[in-house]
Structure formats: C-alpha cells, structure tokens
Image (spheres, helix red, strand yellow):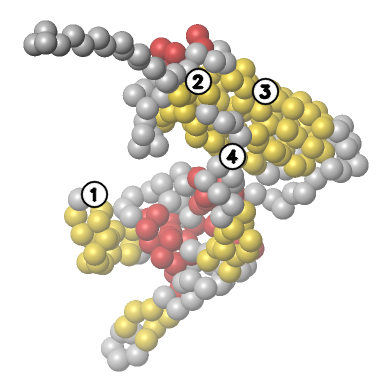
Amino acid sequence: MEEDSMTDISGVSEDSQGQYRCGPASLAAIKMGHIKKPYDIPFVFAEVNADKLFWKYRGPTQPMKLLGKKTEGVGLHVSTKAVGKFQREDITDLYKHGEDSYEERSVMKKALRMCDSSFARYYLNEELEDVEFDFQLLDDIIIGQPFKVCVGIQNKSDKSHDVEVILRADTMLYTGVTKDQVKRHKEELTLKPHAEEKVTLEVTYDDYYSKLRDQCAMNLACLAKVKETDFEYFAQDDFRCIKPDIKIEVKCYFSNNLK
C-alpha cells in the first residue's frame, strides 16, 4: 500500500521532536499500524485506535492482571469539515478498518508487537490457567551473604507444557533505575501433567560485591513464557543488602586535678 498520499497534519499541543506539531503522518501507515514510520504515527494511531483497558493492581512486585477491555470506545467518529458546506464529514475509514473487525484487531495486535511499552506484553497475553507461576520474594540480607532467586511453576492441566524461564539480578539506584547485571539464568523445561518445578538462581557475594551502588539495592526479575502459547509471566522484587550494624564502645576516665 502506498504511504505517500494522504497525510494527517495539525497544529496541536503535541510535543514532537521538541516542537509543538503533529505530522505529516501517512493515513495509509496509520490504518495499517506501521507505527515505526514518521512522523508522529504512534501518537495519531493511539488517538484513533486506542482500547480502554481495566487492570487490577496487586502490589509493586506482582504482575498486573488484565481484567477487561473495551475496544470500541475510542476513534468512533473521526471528522473533518465537508468541502463546500458547513457539515461534518466522517473520515474514520481513512484512519482505521471497521471497528472490531478482523482487520482492525489484526492491525492493533501488529502495532502492539512493535510497541516498546511493557503493558503491551500483558495485553497480548492469551488467557491461560493451565500453568501457574509463583515468584518467591526475598527479605533483605546482610551484605556478604549469598541469596537465591526462585520461581515455582505448577502445571494444573492434563497435558505437558514447555516453559522458558529467565531469572536475573541487577544492581539498582535509589531512584529505581537498574544499573549493572549481577547474574542471569535461563532454563527451559517440560512440565508434565500436574507436575511442580522450581527454577533457582543462586547469587554469591563474589557475584555482587563489586557492583553494589550506594544504597546496596537490587532488582530481582522473572520472565517466563509458555512456549506453545503467547502467554508470558513477569514479576519483580526490590531488596537491599543491609550493611552490618557497627557498635563502638568507648571507655572514658576522668580525673579531677583541681582537688
């Protein structure tokens, strides 16, 4: 499809490369979900094709759960002034395929796969209750001690599942920004029906001591995938290596020489 014909361009309060502008963005590229094309196509695509999502927040270290979605709430009546008369002209079909059609949903999924947002991964997840993951959280440790990062996996179905698990530990600044990778472990396993497995990453003092930052904080993360589906699981935990308490005892003697 040609992408150099009709374009979307407008002077709006949208910050684009340091200027308040929007476009020129190819309407064909917007309609086909080519969000990597210039200019401002991701912004315009979201304006006309966004879905309303409803999430359940389960704490800072647990994955958010997608409870529901409303696909027809945004981009219903894209309009412009009709030529030669003071009437609204609907141009929605220039920006997107028919609402909730197979083509529109396919374009949406394609754009999400090209998107850098972590939420896109949750949205693309298939509903899966066959395999359950349990990322085991750690208490703070005294610096110098080893620790383990563990995830438990349970197959609750009557068939086998191939699972890929990545565990990693990274040092972290007090702002929450991760810095140096301490250790990473990748494991692939086949879960037999109703079986339970545990994947573990063991981290020693030698692994992390030279990479600690001023607050001695770390970020532990687990990313797992059930291979024959599009289901992915992600969870993380922040913890600190606590510096040992130091107690100083000073004995003082006072002698009064004025007596």
Q: Is residue 199 above or below residue 257?
A: below
Image point (30%, 91%), residue name: 85
**Disc 2 element:** strand
Task: Work out how far the residue at label 2 is from the one at label 3, CA to CA, in angstroms.
Answer: 20 Å
The three-letter code of the residue at mark 1 reads: Gln
Q: How far from the left and from the top, in percent, is residue 194?
A: 88, 37
Q: State the residue position of label 1.
A: 17
Q: State the residue position of label 4.
A: 235
Whether label 4 touches label 3, CB < 8 Å: no
Left or right: residue 130 versus residue 1 is: right
Q: Is residue 48 above or below residue 117?
A: below
Q: Earlier in the sequence, mark 4 or mark 2?
A: 2
Q: Quadrant of residue 229?
A: top right
Q: Earlier in the sequence, mark 1 or mark 4?
A: 1
The front one of 83 and 41 is 41
Q: Is residue 128 above or below residue 169?
A: below
Image point (40%, 37%), residue name: 176
Quadrant, the C terminus: top left
Task: Work out how far the residue at label 1 is from the one at label 3, CA to CA, in angstroms.
Answer: 44 Å
**Disc 3 element:** strand
Task: Work out how far the residue at label 1 is from the one at label 4, CA to CA, in angstroms.
Answer: 33 Å
The three-letter code of the residue at mark 4 reads: Ala
Q: Is disc 1 surrounded by few (<14), some (14 to 19) or many (20+) residues within 10 Å?
A: few
Q: State the residue position of label 2.
A: 142
The three-letter code of the residue at mark 2 reads: Ile
Q: State the residue position of label 3.
A: 200
Is residue 5 something one can see in this rendering? no
Q: Earlier in the sequence, mark 2 or mark 3?
A: 2
